[in-house]
Image (spheres, helix red, strand yellow):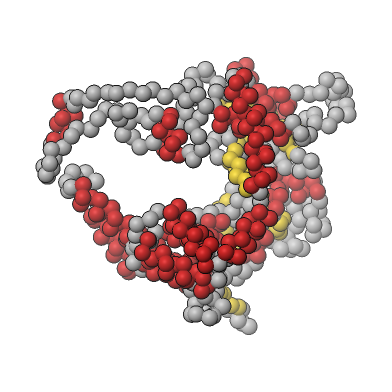
Amino acid sequence: MSAARVARQVLSDALSPGEVCGSQEEWAQALGELQAVMDTATAAQDAAIVRLAAIEPEVLDDGEVIETHRALGHVALDAPAMVSWTLNVSAVQAERRVRAAVRMAADGPEGTPTETGLRGLHTAMGAGRLDAYRASVVATELEEAPAEVAASVVAGLHEYFGSEDGPRLRRRVRRMLARISPDLVRQRAVRARSECRLERWVGEPGVDTWHGTFPSEEAAQAWAAIDALAQQYVTDGVCDRVDRARAKALTDLVAGNATIDVQIVHTIAAEVPTAAGSARGTRASEGASDDLVDVGAPASEAGASKAAPGDLVEVTGLRPGEPTLVSRAWLDHASAPHPTSDTSAGRAAPRPRGEPRGGLAPCDPLTDALLDPDGALTTDTYRPGKALAALVRARDGHCRFPGCHVAARFCDLDHVTPWPTGPTSAANLVCLCRRHHRIKQRPGWQAVLHPDATLTWTDPTGRNRTTHPVDHLHRAVLPDRGSDPAPITYNPRLVTPDAPHSTLEYHLEHNPGPPPARPRIRCRIDHHHPTAARAHLAYTSAHPPRRRALPPPDDPPF
């Protein structure tokens, strides 16, 4: 701790962002030295994680809790949670960090069960020659390799740690494994093919990101079908880029072969009458799914007279526990009543499959959490009823442990105050994934569920963290004012600010595939002449350059 504080203070005192001094070579050397400091600090951090993970609490006969130190390589159940709270990272990232640290920094003696063969990676990081990303690349490739094989590969890579990037190290590891143990590479390929999957998470506002792995031959057939439809979309003018057309082709092919059931639920503030404070919501489910989706903002806030089909409305339920943006046109279409609905009698006629259904859900006016205001769903039994379970899962959205994002549908419903002391009610139930359900029961951990559905956690060191329920009442509405800028074909945040990059340049640098269809490329040759201001900036320096400096160009010469 003392060494870390001194190093941090020394580096903090050395910062002088306002000064203009030093040569290009000197600043490049400074950048390299700082990277070496970061690598060494990461290795020291891994050593600290290994020692933290080896501490297990033990309850004595008299009830006193003491800490026992196990052998390095032991991982306590709550070690990732402690790391997550200390480093402010998600639960998944903390678990990966703990596992990687144990594999590299707790490599046991040769021939022991704790031997991993990755000690060389930790040593190179401590020497400032290998950063955490490249070390993780090598460690991932050697995931299933025996310790002696892993040690041989790491020793063979030692001379490349200071000169090669992550992708090159990955290819080099695979070539070495293919020579040393081809059966291992084949087993890895067989396992990867058996574990093909499709994952989804929220990306940019209003879009989802999908990541899938498929057997190569099946992927080739599916890609051919998607690409053929995408090319037709480009030809017909439905989409202007083939990559955008492929995304639309994929969703069209999938949705065209499925029946989707959409349920609409209105959410209101518990103390506000329905006519004055209703806010539209949706519940979307596929098959037997029962996930609440909450949409939009109160009509009084959004302005019903100003609503436009191009508005973007925030909803929940399309993605468990994660709000996202959908178009108002889609929402209005999903909310449209079936022509056979008997609205005059207050009842709805039988609804054909695929038509939307309705509902009403009260929310807390302060935290906007779903409520069971009259306690009608409370039960005397240990297991909650179906309606109570659906309410709690919809209210929480995901595991209520800080930093955990496991969807509520995969979580346990835990009694914060153990049953039968605590009731089986919405005021005493929370969603916890199985791991954090077990962590809550370990010595030193405490959880308190407040009346507003916020949950306060206390860890064994006395630190507090609070998690909040899903906001089901106030939703963001982004109106379409007709002033949206024209779409661009690259992300300007990912481009270095030296000058505008052409479409072709960006795709060649960031996309391994071919450039987009019909790219709008402007080829030009520009002659650059420095202005007086630019000439002054180019030639004025505290340390004159050793050779004549050229003024920075306005645009690249292509």
Please tell me which residue lies in front, 454 or 145.
145
Residue 458 visible from this viewpoint: no
- Vertical placement of residue 171 versus 147, above or below: above
Q: Residue at x 63, y 62 (%)?
A: 187
Q: Residue at x 29, y 63 (%)?
A: 7
Quarter of the image that includes the C terminus: top left
Question: Where residue 314 sits in the image (x, y, percent)?
Answer: 60, 33
Please tell me which residue lies in front, 499 or 190.
190
Side of 129 relative to 84 (left or right)? left
Residue 385 visible from this viewpoint: yes
Q: Residue 356 sits in which quadrant?
A: top right
Residue projecting furthest to the front: 179
Q: Residue at x 67, y 26 (%)?
A: 330
Question: Where residue 162 sits in the image (x, y, percent)?
Answer: 34, 59
Please tell me which residue lies in front, 12 or 161.
161
Q: Residue at x 79, y 53 (%)?
A: 384
Quarter of the image that includes the N terminus: bottom left
Side of 99 relative to 17 (left or right)? right
Question: Where residue 12 sits in the image (x, y, percent)?
Answer: 27, 55
Residue projecting furthest to the bottom: 61
Side of 349 relative to 155 (left or right)? right
Side of 173 relative to 184 (left or right)? left
- Vertical placement of residue 388 versus 347, above or below: below
- Label count reads 0
- Vertical placement of residue 353 versus 64, above or below: above
Question: Where residue 211 sits in the image (x, y, percent)?
Answer: 60, 44
